[in-house]
Image (cartoon, rainbow, N blue to C red):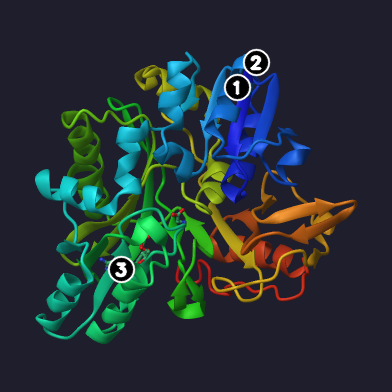
Amino acid sequence: MKVLVVGHGGREHALAWKIRQSPLVTRLWCAPGNPGTANLADNLDIGAEDIAGLVRFAAAEKVDLTVVGPEAPLCAGIVDEFQKHKLLCFGPNKAAAEIEGNKAFARELCRRHRIPGPGFWVFEELAMARSFLDNRPDGPIVVKAAGLAAGKGVTVCKNNEEARAAVGECLEKRRFGEAGSRVVFEEFLEGAEVSLITLTDGRTIVPFDPARDHKAVGDGDKGPNTGGMGVITPVPLMPRMATQIESQIVFPTVHALNRENRRYQGFLYAGLMLTTQGPRVLEYNCRLGDPETQPLLMRLQSDLLPLLLATAEGKLEQQSAPVWDKRVAVCVVACSGGYPGDFKKGVPIFGVDKVTTGPDLQVFHAGTSQRGGDLLTAGGRVLAVTALGVDAAAARQRAYAALDAIEFSGKHYRRDIGLKA
Ligand code: AMP
Ligand code: GLY
């Protein structure tokens, strides 16, 4: 099979790494890929959002399956465009991907189908949003840009004053452009967070093992949110909670989308808060999480490719359930100095080639570039180490030892990934 992976982050490096191991693969490309995927696949000079260019390439090379990593092309309708050209593309179509592309739609979907989430209010006008804040008791509240904002559109506010500032960033300063032209206020929920990624073709629903991302930039969940600083998986869940997540959230969401003529085929990511009243949806993503993908795929023992193919073809029921390595995986992301604020690019990275990688330890590139023989930083999240261990402590010890061997000026990372486990 000829396979094309679309995207250039750590998620796509992990996807290419896993797909490369499939005996079914004869050719593998990444568009555009990164220096990590270059060791596994042929990187193409086609951007992840150049849908016409991707269709042209897939048609010319007779690509059997295109696997889309990031949300932007999915929300822009890449799957629909491939279908028009009779090409197979893994991921939800545009209508189904709206569950991530439009947070107001996602919240209203939950309300219509009684899927548990926080109370919420949607505003487009600054004056109305301000007046809402003026008339509520002071206290914590969450402000979200309704559209795609590269993981930066959410502000968890301690009080109404912070919320006023966050609303101003969206509706007045237009910091997120069109994506912030509508804001969603949400009731602030407390509890432990968990990411649950499900593979579904709209009929068969296969939940993956739960993972815990660490969104805040600093140890102890301090500081602003990022795209994700590290992950531990699996996360032990009380049996009651696990059942509730499936029966109250995952299954109803897939069915709700079906009922609204938005059949979902792909990875459906539910970001959940485990509250004392049960699980609540914080957000949906129409794709694999990043970095969640990295530790999850390292624990996945089954061949991923037949699962992806069957999902895209709507035949997931014919596949046996995925088999997981019982061990714990810890993934720690190393970031550029300043991230999630402004940061420099082009800083030399040392030591990646000194790390001994294998089935139990991998370095996945996220924001790197290659110049001659030099590896350079090219993004906020630069690279991540994922290690497996018999328990969280063993996995942490291996992941951090490897990460400490990699150097670049400004490098920062959280020290407490998986520590609570
Ligand atoms: P999101 O991208 O919507 O998942 O939001 C990013 C992060 O903000 C989440 O991982 C949570 O830590 C936090 N968050 C989002 N929504 C809420 C909420 N309603 N209550 C409390 N925290 C939230
Ligand atoms: N790590 C969170 C996300 O991929 O959205």
Q: Is residue 321 left or right of residue 45?
A: left
**Number of on-image labels:** 3
In the picture, the quarter occupied by the C terminus is: bottom left
- The image quadrant that residue 384 belongs to is bottom right
In the picture, the quarter occupied by the N terminus is: top right
- The image quadrant that residue 415 belongs to is bottom right
Marks 3/1: CA distance? 38 Å
The tag earlier along the polypeptide, 3 or 2, is 2
Q: Which amino acid does label 1 sit on?
A: Arg
Q: Are marks 1 and 2 in contact (CB under 8 Å)?
A: yes
Residue for badge 3: 171
Residue for badge 2: 60
What residue sits 22% from the left and 67% below the top?
Answer: 185
Q: What residue type is labelled 3?
A: Leu
Q: Where is residue 332 in the image (x, y as percent from the top left)?
A: 60, 63
What residue sits 53% from the left and 73% below the top?
Answer: 416
